[in-house]
Image (spheres, rainbow, N blue to C red):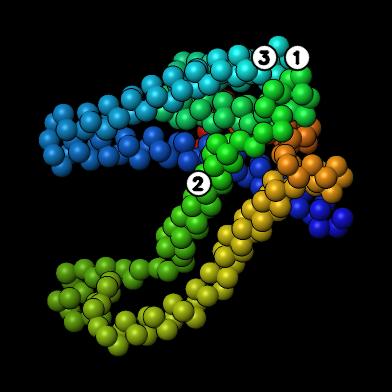
Amino acid sequence: PIYLWVARIGSVFFVLLQQIILVDVAYNWNESWIEKADKAEIDEGTGKGKKWLGAILFSCFVLYAGSLVAIILLYVHFGGCQSNDAFISITLVGSIIATIVQLTMSETGSLLTSASMTAYVTYLCGSAVSKNPNAVCNPKLGETSVGNIVVGLMFVFISLMWTGFSYTNDKRLGGSTTAAPEASVEDAEEGKPVGGVVVNEDADANETNESSDTTSPKSFNNSWKLNAVMALVCCWYAMTLTGWGSIDKRGDISNPDAGDVSMWMLIVSQWIALLLYLWTLIAPSLFPDRDFS
């Protein structure tokens, strides 16, 4: 019972963290392709960046079209139940509102980010209604959806990759190493010691020894973040495999995911993702003096 509640609490924190990570991933996907387009314009010539801009538009079309088809299928297969209809309608309206806000009010958002978030919240809605324990609302009750499992693991894998990537970037770029001031022409002419980067084996060896002595505490302080995320993932896996501890109560091993707790965790995480994305869109306008980059 003690580990059960520890895993439940840890899983809640992981769900919150995952929404933040995935919103960040959606933003960085767009920024990465925009940078590639700009780089192609500079390196390859005018008009060469259009292929990346075309890829952005094509990805937006695929994500929006796929989300619309998925929402229609959700209405067809899971509609007719009050709770399911509410969840699906909130998904549709929330996605439309987020896209309209991004297009009309936001200076930081992008259509690709909105399309990515629309696809993600649509997936969360589909997963939530498929976990409804009411047989009237869930015609798929008792069936194991391999697709949902694979997609869910994919999002966890993306979250872990992004966490590891952010950690290594912080380790490489966030160090406290300082560069020596560059030498001026006057210093060189007067014979003063020259600052800057000196290519010398002895200097490199000394620098390596000094950096290992000075950066190891910082590395230890930073590594706990990655380890904490891994611990939260373990909690989430334990709850996913046991239906948030419902197997111990009901023995429903054939379909441990179906249950009120699993359904509400998914739909609440969807609402958090939508609200978080909307906040990233309107916060720069509400607080122009703050840096949200």
Q: Tell which circle, 2 or 1, labels the residue nearer the N-terminal end.
A: 1
Q: How many marks?
A: 3
Locate residue 258, reporting x and y percent.
Answer: 74, 35
Describe residue 188's horizontal placement relative to residue 121 as left or right.
left
- Which disc number belongs to residue 82? 1
Other residues around mark 3 within 10 Å, as few (<14) / some (14–19) / many (≥20): some
Residue at position x 46%, y 60% in the image: 168
Q: Is residue 106 above or below residue 29?
A: above
Q: CA distance from mark 2 to mark 3?
A: 31 Å
Describe residue 50's horizontal placement relative to residue 10 as left or right.
left
Locate residue 236, reporting x and y percent.
Answer: 68, 49
Q: Secondary structure at mark 2?
A: helix
Q: Secondary structure at mark 3?
A: loop
- Which disc number belongs to residue 158? 2
Q: CA distance from mark 3 to mark 1?
A: 8 Å
* Residue 219 shows up from this direction: yes
Q: Nearer the viewer, mark 2 or mark 3?
A: 3
- Which disc number belongs to residue 79? 3
Q: Is residue 236 above or below residue 173?
A: above
Amino acid type, callout 3? Gly
